[in-house]
Image (cartoon, rainbow, N blue to C red):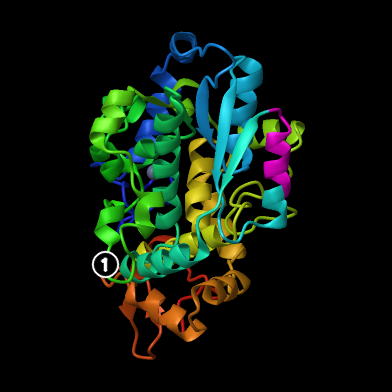
Amino acid sequence: MKYCKKCILPDSRPGVELNADGVCSACIGAEEKRQTIDWQGRKRTLVEIFNAHEAVNGQYDCIVPVSGGKDSTWQAYTLKNTFGLKPLALTYKCKYRTPLGQKNLDNLINIGVDHIDFTVSPDVERKFMLKSLQRNGSVSLVEHMAMWAITLKMAVRLGIKLVVWGENPGLEYGGNEKERGNPFLNHDWIRKYGVTNGTFAADWADDDLTMDELYTFTLPTEQELSDARIKSIFLGWYLKWDPLEVAEFSRTIGFQWADKPVFGYYPYADLDCDFIVIHHFFKWYKFGITRLWDNLAIEIRNNRLSREEAISYIKNNPEPIPALQIKNLCEFLGITEQSFWQIAEAHRNLNIWRQEKDGKWHLPALVGEFGFWPDTYPQDSK
Ligand SMILES: [Zn+2]
């Protein structure tokens, strides 16, 4: 396990590759983005795409999946007010939407867009989420899979030819420029970049969770997608996207920040749903990082923090175990907290963790690189 010399991400995190100088792919990508991208040109291309997809007779010009977060607030506003489109917004309703998440979603709808709040049957979601937590240590796989499937199915059924996603997961997970920038979302692309651990709904079917139940999570077939000629674009490819700038803009149109960060560094991210916190929490076991690492790495790349300042922040702001969110998740899944910790333990990455004589787990690389151990971290789970 080695850390990037520019930011603080380790190569245990998927998609992070260090070059010969010890600099990660994300840092190199960020530098290239700053120096070489012709944003004006990309914006012109975006306008051409919008013009080509203009709907007639009051139909929707595009479909836009939203969570109600800072990014989707900015997306909905930009599509409607900057580019004059008529988007249909669509949300997969997470099981523990927070009151602030609901407020922010209402605010997004009040920008003046039609909106579908899609709720999955709790029984199905419970079974699926427990399986994905046990098998992949992920509670968010269900949400990712639902977002791809529901959005694309709606686009096919309603004949909406343009889907406008937000940031591109391909940027974070590598891939060539063509695939990252402007993909035709076929099954291969989703397997590679869809953050579903390379699986499709059918991979999860068994006696307990049937294909009928998994219909919600099942993509349109390749044939349906191809016949419908749906174009999928990522707004983050065409318009410069900085988390802080987007959050500040969204705040000017009614998006509310939290008083303090829920988990990580940003008081304006991960506000919508309690379960996303668990998703980030598992990174500690799998990759040896917490959400702080992800957030602070972005701040370093955007020149708002030095590497030293970021490390000092980690040292002085240890993150607590998200006890309330864990309790809620266990309640929803119908498991004990003891089972939860057993599942977490089963996903501990033994390539990077070492158990000491006293029985506690340690990350030797972390101490080696930063020279301290954030001692209130969940290194010693139940
Ligand atoms: Zn880096």
Report x, y in % for residue 153. Answer: 40, 37
Res 349 quadrant in image: bottom left
Rendered residue at 25%/68% (across/down):
351
Ligand 1 position by quadrant: top left
The quadrant of the picture occupied by the N terminus is bottom left
Q: Is residue 108 magenta?
A: yes
The magenta stretch is 103-112
Q: Is residue 271 above or below residue 155?
A: below
Q: How many residues crowd around disc 1 within 10 Å: few (fewer than 14), some, or many (20 or more)?
A: few
Res 246 quadrant in image: top right
Rendered residue at 38%/89% (across/down):
359
Q: Is residue 152 left or right of residue 83?
A: left
Q: Is residue 48 left or right of residue 12?
A: right
Secondary structure mostly taken by the magenta-highlighted segment of the chain: helix
Q: Is residue 224 left or right of residue 248?
A: left
Disc 1: which residue: 206
